[in-house]
Image (cartoon, rainbow, N blue to C red):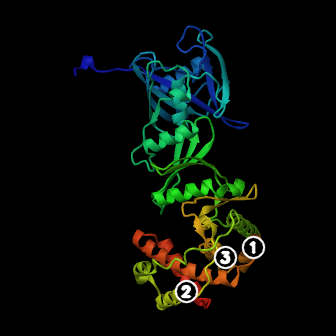
């Protein structure tokens, strides 16, 4: 292609002026008027680069003063996002540079009355309508933390932003983690509307993927892809079955796709109890809530007689993987414990969470609410199963164990204590084996710690 045939595009500059309002951040918008393109629509203060010798920052400072009267120091201009845009009316493409500014002098006011008839501050979650789709694309990309986006509208698309014709595509940065597969993004947006930003919040050791998704019109959801169909089926069955009986203590299922192994869930509050520290009195209160939550799970359906005995079938395989990491005497203790399981009565089965531990529990201190998440290991089983991984958290703290029992409404029976020992040993062996193969030292250490604790207690 010769030089005279090279494609050229107009260059726009857009001001994203942000201030803190009473209910959060607000952005400055102006309403276009007169005979200009998109009259009657809200847009950023903006303009074109004035010739080949003006840089984009200088152009932004100039256009800002010309349209709003605000004086902006070039040192206060921050790059926000670059958008490659094509209008729907058949015009050519253009490139827009969007800049964030949080410091200025003066008060914004309409300065060009022939092309603008209103100007004001608007909360990010209460934007005016109609709004130019190009402007909205830049704002959504900025809020998503993107550095570059493509916004190519189709012939016949409206000038105004509408979720039904949203053409924004964010361009990932090099090495961006947790990229959401296109088909999962489409599935989630069919369920809740366009999503402005995605944040990968996956647990490091799991093969399942989880994103926190913020909607373009407000709202937050969690989107999860399960690592296999079995986990997907378990979580969906729990969310459709017994989880609603927990009330606000658990998320709600918004949508599920078995082929994608994906779910969309409502947001729950609080922060994870994994690694969190609290004063002793507050710890006791939290563990009392944990006992109450466990009781709610286990009474969400009537108990049924057990069909299968305790899960000893995989012991030899797990023991083979764990053996290099066991202390002297551990294997003998493990086998002796497994032998005692044959003489234990089969417990009734109830709904169980299956992975009831601190990292799947979230505490909202302000509202005094405990939430539980992650039901992909949920299945019917003995109620005591849900205390296996939790028991490590109250070791050495009889006050925390008592708080759990008080919340649960009763102490463990002698049979449940025996089952807890057996299940804890089996979980330790499988955790050590899995952690050793997958490079997870925390799982290995927790398993070793549990075996040492049980042996020191003289169990079985």
Cα distance in 3D space between marks 1 and 2: 32 Å
The label on residue 394 is: 3
Identify the residue position indicated by label 1 in the image.
Answer: 403
Q: How far apart are marks 2 and 3 (CA)?
A: 28 Å
Give residue 163's position: percent from left, percent from top.
55, 29
Give the residue at mark 2: 342
Q: In this view, does 122 lie above or below 24?
A: above
From the top left corner, tell me how far across and down residue 22 is, in percent: 73, 36
CB under 8 Å between discs 1 and 2: no
Classify 10 Å Cα crowding around label 3: few (below 14), some (14-19), many (20 and above).
some
Residue, far left: 2
Does label 2 or label 3 sit earlier along the sequence? Answer: 2
Q: Is mark 1 on a helix, strand or loop?
A: helix
Relative to the observer, which residue lies in front, 236 or 57?
236
- The residue under the point 72% across, 80% down is 398
Q: In which quarter of the image is the C terminus?
A: bottom right
- Indicate the position of residue 421 as horizontal and vertical percent values: 60, 82
Q: Residue 239 carries which label?
A: none
Of mark 1 and mark 2, the one earlier in the sequence is 2
* Residue 77 shows in the view: no
Graded by Cα atoms within 10 Å as few (under 14), some (14 to 19) or many (20 or more), the crowding at tag 1 reads many
Q: Which residue is drawn at 77% across and 72% down?
A: 409
* Residue neighbourhood size for the residue with mark 2, other residues' Cα within 10 Å, grouped as few (<14), some (14–19), many (≥20): few
Residue 455 seen in render: yes
């Amino acid at each position: 292609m010769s030089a005279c045939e090279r494609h050229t595009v107009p260059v726009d500059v857009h001001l994203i002026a942000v201030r803190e309002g009473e209910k959060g951040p607000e952005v400055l918008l102006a309403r276009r008027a007169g005979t200009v393109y998109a009259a009657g629509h809200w847009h950023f203060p903006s303009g074109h680069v004035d010739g080949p010798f003006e840089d984009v920052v200088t152009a932004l400072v100039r256009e800002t003063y010309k349209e709003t009267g605000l004086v902006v120091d070039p040192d206060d201009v921050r790059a926000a996002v670059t958008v490659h845009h094509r209008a729907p009316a058949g015009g050519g493409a253009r490139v827009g540079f969007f800049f964030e500014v949080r410091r200025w002098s003066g008060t914004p006011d309409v300065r060009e009355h022939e092309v603008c008839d209103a100007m004001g501050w608007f909360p990010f979650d209460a934007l005016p309508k109609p709004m130019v789709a190009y402007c909205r694309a830049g704002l959504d990309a900025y809020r998503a933390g993107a550095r570059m986006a493509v916004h190519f509208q189709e012939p016949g698309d409206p000038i105004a932003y509408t979720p039904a014709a949203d053409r924004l595509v964010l361009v990932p940065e090099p090495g961006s983690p947790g990229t959401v597969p296109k088909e999962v993004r489409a599935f989630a947006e069919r369920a809740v509307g366009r999503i402005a930003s995605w944040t990968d919040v996956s647990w490091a050791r799991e093969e399942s993927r989880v994103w926190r998704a913020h909607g373009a019109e407000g709202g937050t959801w969690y989107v999860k892809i399960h690592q296999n169909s079995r986990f997907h089926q378990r979580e969906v069955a729990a969310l459709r079955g017994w989880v609603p009986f927990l009330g606000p203590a658990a998320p709600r299922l918004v949508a599920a796709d078995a082929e994608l192994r994906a779910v969309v869930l409502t947001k729950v509050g609080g922060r994870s109890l994994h690694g969190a520290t609290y004063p002793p009195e507050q710890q006791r209160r939290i563990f009392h809530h944990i006992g109450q939550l466990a009781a709610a799970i286990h009474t969400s359906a009537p108990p049924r007689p057990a069909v299968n005995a305790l899960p000893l079938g995989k012991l030899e395989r797990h023991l083979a993987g764990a053996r290099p990491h066991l202390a002297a005497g551990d294997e003998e203790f493990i086998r002796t414990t497994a032998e005692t399981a044959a003489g234990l009565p089969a417990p009734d089965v109830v709904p169980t969470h299956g992975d009831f531990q601190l990292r799947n529990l979230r505490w909202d201190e302000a509202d005094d609410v405990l939430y539980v998440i992650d039901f992909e290991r949920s299945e019917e089983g003995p109620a005591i199963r849900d205390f296996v991984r939790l028991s490590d958290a109250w070791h050495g703290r009889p006050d925390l164990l008592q708080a759990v029992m008080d919340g649960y409404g009763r102490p463990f029976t002698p049979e449940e204590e025996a089952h807890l020992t057996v299940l804890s040993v089996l979980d330790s062996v499988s955790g050590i084996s899995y952690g050793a193969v997958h490079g997870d030292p925390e799982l290995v250490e927790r398993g070793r710690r549990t075996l040492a604790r049980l042996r020191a207690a003289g169990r079985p």
